[in-house]
């Protein structure tokens, strides 16, 4: 088996580690949360290639606080996934505070609050990005959460609500005063959703306004983009979302570049096929074959970017609904001939996980 699959070169750490509260982050690259995509199996692969911090998909703090079992089970974590953050959303101080204890009991080192979610179902209730419209209220809620939390509280924000209201620097100062231990800034407004480009000038402004660690986020999909994010903003770390979809090795490429080495080439199609099937085994182990294969259609398609015949593979993915079907498709398109790798994660203790809820940030 190739070195990429069995034993990726340990990433050369590009900078001394830094701390979020009392938690040491051993490198500068994080996998950003992506509902429906950044499941435990995907996070394990990202860590293997050098992601130093991983975050779960977002879950409702209120549902956690009232003991909703399905929501608690969405906060799945690999035993060796550390440091790891669990992401919650909400605006009610009581349930947010209560969620910190639950998250800590589940073994996470950090609890992250989603103040960037643009989804109307979330913002109409005053949570997600809507919290950025009331910086003083958001800070009060976070102060209470920080006071009751056994672990550091971090927050993920956007640039602001709209072009006319890019208040991330003001929100960042308020959150720092409330005791928040680190921030991730997605440099788009709520109105932009995922269009246009993330505003790195604004991310730089946030960084220069606070003393806590800041992760820059938005549009980093190559070593060159990562370098630009670091150089143009001065951030402590970078959180990568879409750029890591189907390409967990991007962390290794960026780490190499930051260490002054030649970034390793993209794995060969056969190696990529093996990784895809390893992820499939993980997702099926976590969610069962029916739900897992539904999730894998989109996840598998991402691995075919830049691979010859990718468009045909993606057409096949739309129809594939069994594990065997995806194995055949992958063998044919990626010329993968080896054994299907074992799942990178063990089966969950209480049976298949529930389907993650749609989210965003
Ligand atoms: C499908 C999808 C799901 C997402 N889910 C979440 C989420 O649950 N929580 C969150 O804070 N951000 C979420 N995001 C936002 C990303 O974390 C990130 O902020 C955004 O995609 C910009 O970064 P990128 O350019 O590296 O993709 C999601 C993004 C996508 C594309």
Image: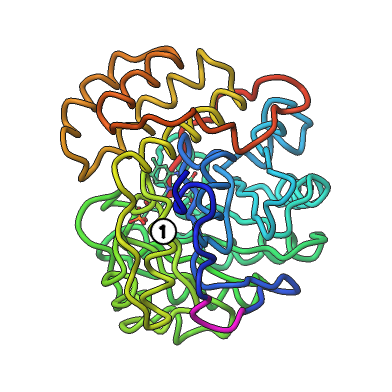
Residue 187 is situated, as x and y percent measured from the top left of the image, at 34, 65
SS for callout 1: strand
Residue 82 is situated, as x and y percent measured from the top left of the image, at 69, 57
Asked if 327 appears above or below 83 in the picture, the reply is above
Asked where in the image residue 218 lies, by quadrant, the reply is bottom left
**324 on left or right of 13:** left
Magenta region, main secondary structure: loop
Crowd band around label 1 with a 10 angstrom C-alpha radius: few (<14), some (14–19), many (20+): many
- Which residue is found at the position 59% from the left and 54% from the top? 113
Q: Which stretch appears magenta?
A: 13-17
**283 on left or right of 100:** left
**155 on left or right of 105:** left
- Which residue is found at the position 69% from the left and 25% from the top? 70
Asked where in the image residue 226 lies, by quadrant, the reply is bottom left
Q: What colour scheme has been applied to the protein in the rendered image?
A: rainbow
Asked where in the image residue 275 lies, by quadrant, the reply is top left
- Which residue is found at the position 58% from the left and 52% from the top? 55
Asked if 5 appears above or below 76 in the picture, the reply is below
Asked if 206 appears above or below 129 in the picture, the reply is below
Residue 81 is situated, as x and y percent measured from the top left of the image, at 67, 52
What residue would you read off at disc 1? 240
Residue 16 among those drawn in magenta: yes
Asked if 37 appears above or below 157 in the picture, the reply is above
Which of the two residues, 2 or 160, is positioned nearer the viewer here?
2
Residue 46 among those drawn in magenta: no
The response on whether ligand 1 sits within 8 Å of label 1 is yes
Which of the two residues, 129 or 49, is positioned nearer the viewer here?
49
- Which residue is found at the position 54% from the left and 28% from the top? 281
Residue 260 is situated, as x and y percent measured from the top left of the image, at 37, 83
Which of the two residues, 158 or 15, is positioned nearer the viewer here?
15
């Amino acid at each position: 088996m190739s070195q990429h699959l069995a034993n990726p070169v340990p990433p050369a750490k590009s900078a001394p580690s830094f701390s979020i509260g009392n938690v040491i982050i051993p490198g500068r690259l994080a996998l950003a949360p992506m509902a429906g995509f950044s499941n435990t199996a995907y996070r394990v692969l990202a860590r293997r290639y050098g992601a130093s911090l991983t975050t779960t998909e977002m879950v409702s703090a209120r549902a956690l606080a009232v003991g909703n079992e399905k929501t608690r089970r969405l906060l799945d974590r690999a035993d060796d996934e550390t440091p790891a953050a669990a992401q919650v959303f909400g605006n009610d101080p009581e349930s947010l505070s209560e969620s910190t204890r639950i998250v800590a009991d589940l073994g996470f080192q950090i609890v992250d609050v989603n103040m960037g979610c643009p989804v109307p179902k979330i913002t109409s209730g005053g949570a997600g990005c809507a919290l950025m419209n009331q910086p003083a209220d958001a800070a009060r809620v976070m102060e209470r959460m920080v006071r009751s939390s056994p672990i550091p509280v971090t927050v993920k924000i956007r640039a602001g609500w709209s072009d006319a209201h890019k208040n991330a620097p003001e929100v960042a100062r308020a959150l720092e005063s409330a005791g928040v231990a680190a921030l991730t800034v997605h440099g788009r407004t709520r109105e932009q959703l995922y269009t246009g480009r993330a505003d790195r000038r604004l991310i730089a402004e946030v960084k220069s306004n606070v003393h806590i660690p800041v992760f820059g986020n938005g549009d980093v999909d190559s070593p060159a983009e990562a370098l630009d994010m670091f150089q143009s903003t001065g951030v402590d770390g970078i959180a990568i979302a879409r750029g890591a979809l189907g390409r967990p090795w991007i962390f290794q490429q960026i780490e190499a570049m930051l260490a002054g080495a030649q970034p390793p080439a993209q794995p060969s199609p056969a190696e990529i096929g093996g990784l895809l099937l390893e992820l499939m085994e993980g997702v099926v182990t976590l969610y069962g074959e029916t739900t897992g294969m539904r999730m894998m259609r989109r996840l598998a398609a991402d691995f075919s970017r830049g691979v010859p015949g990718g468009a045909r593979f993606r057409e096949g993915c739309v129809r594939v609904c069994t594990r065997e079907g995806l194995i055949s498709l992958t063998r044919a398109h990626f010329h993968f001939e080896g054994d299907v790798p074992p799942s990178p994660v063990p089966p969950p203790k209480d049976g298949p996980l529930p389907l993650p809820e749609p989210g965003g940030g």
